[in-house]
Amino acid sequence: MTQLAELPRLESAARPASAAESQSESAPSLVRISGLYKSYGATPVLRGVDLTIRTGALTAVLGPSGSGKTTMLRLLAGFERADRGQIELGDRTVDNARSAVPPEKRRIGYVPQDGALFPHLTVRENVGFGLPRAQRRSGRIEELLELTDLGGMASRYPHQLSGGQQQRVALARALAPRPDLVLLDEPFSALDAALRTSVRAEVLAILRATACTAILVTHDQDEALSMADRIAVLREGRVVQHGTARELYDTPADPQLACFLGEANLLDATLTPSGADLGPLGLLPVLPECGGGCAEGEGAKGAGASSNGAKDAAAATTASVGATATALIRPEQFSVDVCDDAADADSARAGIPGLVERCDYYGHDAMLTVRPQAERTDNVRRLPEKLLVRMPAGGQLSAGTLVKLTVRSPIAVWRAEDVAAAA
Amino acid sequence: MQEGALAANGAPMSAPSLSPAAAAAAVSGLVASRRARRPPVLLGLSLAASALVLLPMLFLVYQAAQAGWAPLQRLLFRSLTAHLLINTIELAVCVTVLCAILGTAAAYATERTDLPLRRMWSALIVIPLAIPDFIVGYTWSSLWPSLHGLAGAVLVMTLSLNPLIYLPVKAALREADPGLEEAARSLGLSPLGTFRRVTLHQIRPALIGGSLVVCLALLAEFGAFEILRFQTFTTTIFTEFTLAYSTSAASALALVLVLLGLGVLVARHYAAGRHGRVSRASGGARRPPIRHRLGLRVIPVTLGCLALTGLSLGVPISTLGYWLTRTQPTTLPAVAPVPTAAETTLLYALLAAGGAILLALPVALLVERHPGPLSRVLESVTLSVQGLPGLVIAMALVFFAVRYAFPLYQSPILMVAAYSVLFCPLALVSVRASLAHAPARLEETARSLGKRPLAALLRVTLPLIAPGLAAGFCLVFLSVVTELTATLLLLPSGVKTLATQFWAFQNDQSYAAAAPYATAIVAIAVVPGYLLGVWFDKKRGA
C-alpha cells in the first residue's frame, strides 16, 4: 500500500475516515440485502442485489442513471416493495417480498433529492415533524438546529431558505427521531457546482458528529470517492463492486468500472511471474490486491469480495502466467520527462517517447493527450493511439512537445478471459 | 365488487375513447395484482363516486331501451331530429368561429401589445363568463324583442362565450417561448407572417381546446335559446319532457345529445393530448414575451375592446339597471321574495359544492397517487359528465327517483346530488391541479418520519391542497348559483331559487319583476367570480 501514497489523487482522498474504516470491518452489520429483485411492469430495475452495510459507516451507492440506485433506496425506506429477495435491518426482516414493515415503523431517516420540506411548516416545525408531541419541547429540535447551524432560521419557511439551507433542514428533520439509518437520495444534485462542495462538507460533518449510519445515493463519482467510507457500485440492477474508495479506484472490478470512476488508460499486457509485460512500457509490478483476479466474482459477493481477492493475489498471479490481460494505468501514474530533441527521445533513458497532442490546463493540474511514437518501437500492437497523462500543478506543455513517459507505481490488470466472461 | 363491475360495464358506453378490453384489464388488475397497495378505502370511495356519476347515464340508456328499438327508430329518424342537428351545427360553427376570432384578437391585444389599461380590459373581457347566458339572453330580448332565431342566438352566445377562448389563448400566449418568434423575425418574417407561421402554431392547442369547450357549452345551454326562441336539442327535450310528458321521445333525443357531447369531449381529449408536443426551445428562466408597440393603432384597438366589453358587459348590466328602476304590473305572484330565494340558492350552492368536492377528492387522490388503468378509467368516467348537459342529468335522476326511489323525488337530496354529479368534473380538475403542490414525496417523507398514512394525509397533504379545494369549492358554488335547467326539473315544488323565480317572471314577460332576481344572481356570482379570477391570475403570474 505504501507505494500508492505518491498518487496525488489518493493523497487528497485520504481522510480521517480510516479509523471508521477499520472499525467498520469489525462492526456488526446493520443492513443486509440479499437477492433483491424489483421490476416496474416488464422493466427489471434491480436484478439480484446483495449488499451488507455495517453500523457507523457512510456508504455511497454509485451508479449511472437507470442503474436502480434510487429504487434500492426506496425499497430500503419501504416506499416500494420487493418482488424477490429480502432486506434485513439489524435483527428485523423488514421486507421479504411477502410482507413488509411500513415506512413509519422502520426507523429510517430519508432525505429526498430536493429536500422535500413541507412548504406549509416553518423550519422548526419541519424538524420537529417526526418527534412525538412530548419530545418537541425536550430541546431536541434546538439541538439539531444548532448542529446544522440553522439556529437563526427556526421561524422561516422553506421558500425563504437557500438551497444549501434547505438540504440542512431536510437532514436535521431526518435525524431528529434518532433513526438507525439515514438515506440520502442524490441530496446535492439540485445545488449548483459552487455550493455543492461546501454543502457536501457540512453534511459530512453533521453525519460524522452524530455517528450515524448513512447511505448516500449518487451518480457523481467524485462525490462518492471523496465522501464515503465505502462505495457500492450499481450497474444494471446489480452490485458490481463494494469496497473503499481506494480499492475501487485502484483495482476496479472491470475496465468499464475503471472508466466510470475516472480517466483510464487501458492497455494490452502479458502476465509474467514478476509482473505484467506491457511491451514498450516495460515490465510493471502488479498491485497485490489485484493479481489478475480483480474481475473474479464481479464483487457480487458483497463487502468481502475485494479483501478475499487480496489473499489469493500471489496464487492467482502464478496461476495465470503467460495469459494475456488488460492493464489499467491511471493518468497520474505516469511521470513525464520533457525531451530536448529527437535524439534525446531516442536515447536509452527508460520509458517510451511520445508527442504531446493537446494540453488541457485545469490550474491544479493539467491533462496531456500524448501520442506514443510507436513507429520507433518494435512492439506496436500493444500501445493505444493516445495516452492520457496527468501532470501536477505548474506544468503546462504546448502541443508538439516531445516527452518520455514512465509508469511509476504498480498497476491493476484483468486477465482477458475474466473480462470476456464478465462481458 | 358490484360497483367495480358497474364501472367496468358502464365505461365503454360513457367514454367511447376507452375500449372494453382496457376496462376489463383494469378490473382484472384489481383482483390479480400482487402489488395491490391502493388503499382499499380510497379505492372503494372512488368506485362509489364514479358509480354515482354514471348512474344518470345508465338510467337514460335504460329508459330509451325500454321503449324498444322500433319506436326509438321512429323517434330518432324524423325531420325534427334533422332540423335540430342542422340548427346545432349552424349555431356551433358560427359561434365557435366568431368566438375564436374575437377571443384570439382580444388575447393578442392584451398579452402582446402595449395597449394601455391592459389589466382592466382583461378583467372586463372575462367578467361576462360569470353572467349566466339566460340573463344575457333576457337583457337582449327585453331590449330588442324582435331579436330571435339563429341571429339572436349567435349574437348572445358569442358575447357570452368568447372568454372561454380568450382565457386559454391568453395563457398560451403568455407561456409561449418568445425565442421562437424572435428567431422567426431574425429569419426575415414580417410581424404578420410571424403570427401566422409561428404564434398561431404555439396557441393552436389552446384555440382548439377552447373552441371545443364553447361547443360543449352550446350543446348544454337551455335558457338563452328558450328566451330567443331558437330550437335546439335541449329546448326540444325540455318541452317534450315537461309539457308533452313524452319520456321516450325526450330520452331518445337526449341520447343523440349525449353522443354529440361525448364526441366533442373525446375530440378535446385528443386536442389536449397534442399539447405536449409544443416544446420550449430554450430552458431556464422565462423571459416575458415581446410586446408590439401600437403607436397610433392604439385608437382602433381600444375602440375594439370598448365595443366588445360594451356589448358583452355594458348592455346586460345597463339593461338590468334600467329594469330595476321600472315598476311593471305583474299578474304573477312572487312565490319567494328576493331574500328568501337568495337564501335557498346559497344553501343549495354550499351543499352542492361540498358534495362535489367529496366526490372528486378520492378519485383525484387515486389518479394522482396510484396511476394505472383502473384509475384512468375512473377519471375518464368522472370527467365524461362534462359532456352531459345538466338537463340530461336532471332528467335521468327524475326517471330514477320516480321508478326506484319515489321518496327522493322532488326532495332536496336529489337536487344536491344532481348538482354534485353535474359539477364534479370542475371540482376534480381543481383538486387534481392542487395535488401538484403536494407531491407523493412529501407524504413518503412524513411516513419515514413515523407518521401513519392517515396522519400523513391530514398533516401534510390536506393543508397543501386546501387552497385548491377552496378554489374548486368556489367554482362549483358559482356554477350552482347560475344553474337553471337542472334546477327547473328537480327543485322541490313550492321552493324557489333566484334562478327559478327569475325564470317564472321572465316567462311571463314581467321583465321588471325578474330584474331584482337577475341582479341578485349577478351580484352573487360575478363579484366572487371576479375575485377568483384575479387570484388565479396572480398565482399563475407568480
Image: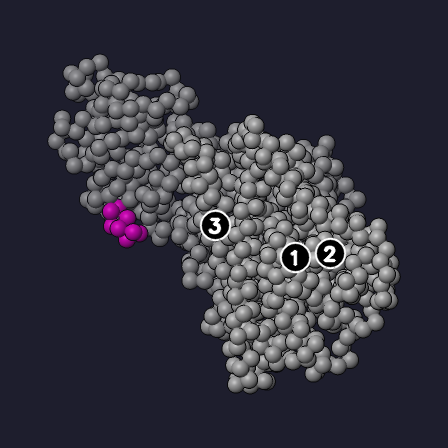
Is residue A3 shown in magenta? no
Query: Does B450 appear above or below B73?
Result: above
Looking at the image, which residue is at 83% across and 71% down?
Answer: B494
Q: Position of residue A361 (x, y in %)?
A: 37, 22
B341 displayed left or right of B223: right
Does residue B416 appear in the picture of this structure?
Answer: yes
Marks 1/3 same chain: yes
On screen, residue A54 versus residue B322, left or right, reads left
Quadrant, the N terminus of chain B: bottom right
Q: Which mark is residue B147?
A: 1
**Chain under callout 1:** B
Q: Which residue is mark 2?
A: B142
The secondary structure type at the circle numbered 3 is helix
Labels 2 and 3: the sequence-earlier one: 2
Indicate which disc, 1 or 3, sits on the residue closer to the N terminus.
1
Dot 2: within a 10 Å radius of its alpha carbon, few (fewer than 14), some, or many (20 or more) residues? many
Query: Which numbered tag is attached to residue A320?
Result: none
> Disc 2 to disc 3, how far (Cα)?
46 Å
Q: Amino acid at mark 3?
A: Gly
Residue found farthest to the front: B146
Which segment is the magenta one? A415-423
Q: Which amino acid does the dot numbered 2 rest on?
A: Ser
Q: Which residue is mark 3?
A: B276
Residue drawn at the location 61% of the way across and 76% of the way down: B251
Point 70% across, 82% down: residue: B404
Q: Are marks 2 and 1 in contact (CB under 8 Å)?
A: no
Labels 2 and 1 within one chain: yes
